[in-house]
Image: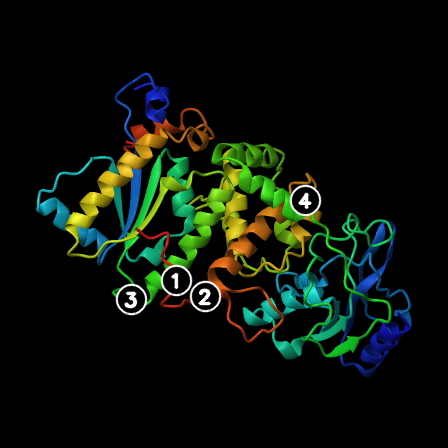
Amino acid sequence: MKELQDLARKLLSEGTVKVVIGYEEGPRGARAAFITDPEQADPLIFDTRCVQNLAAYLNPRRKQIATLGKPAVVVKGCDARSVAGLIRENQIARDSVVIIAMQCGGVLENPDVAGELTSEAVSTRCGGCDVCEPKLFDHYIKSATAKTPPVNPKRTEQLAALAKMTPTERWNFWSEEFSRCIRCHACREACPMCFCVQCTAEKGTPLWIDAAATPRANRAWQTMRVLHQAGRCVDCLECERACPEHIPLGLLARYVADSVERRFEYKAGDDPSVPAPMGIYRTDDDEELIR
Amino acid sequence: MSDDVERGTSTANSTWSPKIVAFVCNWCTYTGADLAGTSRLKMDPNVRVIRLTCSSRVNPLFIIKAFERGADGVVVSGCHTGDCHYSTGNYYARRRFAILHDLLDFMGVEPNRLTFSWVSASEGNKWQELVNETTQRVKALGPFHEFQDMTPQGEFQEMAQKGGACQ
């Protein structure tokens, strides 16, 4: 913790960066902090409650943060993949951001309360983590306590249960979930990789997706949003946490990410030089679906 | 026609037959379909052809929209790999279809309602087979109630009056 605060102080007082985006103590667990003054770096923390993917604040759509000046961002290994994604897709330049990577031993599913990292409490995305020690960083802060996180089987079980259903049952499952959607677009706003200047959901001519929260529009909206994240999503679950109606959006994202991995042998990683899977092709891609 | 018949929901009515929308590329499949027509090959009349420049022009939202507007099945067809008029369009399209197919399946759309194929300009026979086979497959699945029931009452008649896609 001390190491992180000292680094933030140093970067700010040297003028290397104008803002350090990190975590601080909030009224309900850890929350994002924007430190612009080297004297005020003390609140910075990093522990198992630091669930949020702060790479979302580097998204060029967040103009109010860009106006603060060059950022340094505190990331876990998994979040570093989002930064790599933004660099890969030419949304930010590598030298326009200072990456402070933390060695991480897993985070909690619910960031509001501190607790032991048990297999029920740990985030579903921590299981099988291969980026506990990130490769994309400018500064790397090691942890003496971080160890391999336990596996939370909840998400895999949900996916397996859905896979067993008939198409009609799956349709009804999602109809039920989407019926709660109020089309607040919080899933889009929270997503580090939703970076279009104008969203198709807000285009009127032609009207692809109704603006009102109707069953038809909700389904089309989520289909489009998730498809646009194919090969981009790093399963950070910001969309699901942002959803005020608790729609399990992470299931859709995870399913598509798995599908991309299975079909194109691509897993969103922290190397920005690897091209995005939907922007390239191989002449010998699988043709099982083509008649 | 009553709204029910328009939606294809009146199952008692034996006249129901599927509406299938085909998004085809200008250079291969459209020409192939044209060949099938000029060769007077007998085909089920259920497929409505929409001509696009390339199979990679197909935005997944086209397919969603087709289902919303009353399609029971969708066909997307383009040039064989290596034959694309724009060299590489169909390679990108192939990747997109694969992911779209998986996602729609996961969201509960019966995968047999979606057909992807490559039909070249000389394959009139293949187009004929594709049309007949797809029609049979979609017929077996019945009307796509799930999507059509989400469309607000009256929108189908409105489209019909305008002579729109639902006709």
Q: Residue at x 82, y 59 (%)?
A: A48
Q: Amino acid at mark 1?
A: Tyr
Q: Amino acid at mark 3?
A: Tyr
Question: Which tag, 2 or 4, sits closer to the chain's start?
Answer: 4
Give SS at disc 3: loop
Q: Give the x, y percent position of residue B60.
A: 42, 49
Q: Chain of mark 3?
A: B
Observer able to see residue B165: no
Q: CA distance from mark 1 to mark 4?
A: 32 Å
Dot 4 corresponds to which residue?
Answer: A243
Q: Are the numbered discs 2 and 3 placed on the same chain, yes or no?
A: no
Q: Nearer the viewer's eye, disc 1 or disc 3?
A: 1
Q: Residue at x 72, y 74 (%)?
A: A99
Q: Are the numbered discs 1 and 4 placed on the same chain, yes or no?
A: no
Q: Nearer the viewer's eye, disc 2 or disc 4?
A: 2
Q: CA distance from mark 4 to mark 3?
A: 41 Å
Q: CA distance from mark 1 to mark 2?
A: 7 Å
Q: Amino acid at mark 2?
A: Gly
Q: Chain of mark 2?
A: A
Asked whether A115 or B3 is in front, the reply is A115
Dot 2 corresponds to which residue?
Answer: A279
Give SS at disc 2: helix
> Relative to A267, is A161 above or below?
above
Q: Residue at x 39, y 62 (%)?
A: B92
Image quarter where the N terminus of chain A lies is: bottom right
Q: Give the x, y percent position of residue A65.
A: 71, 64
Dot 3 corresponds to which residue?
Answer: B86
Q: Give the x, y percent position of residue A209.
A: 48, 42
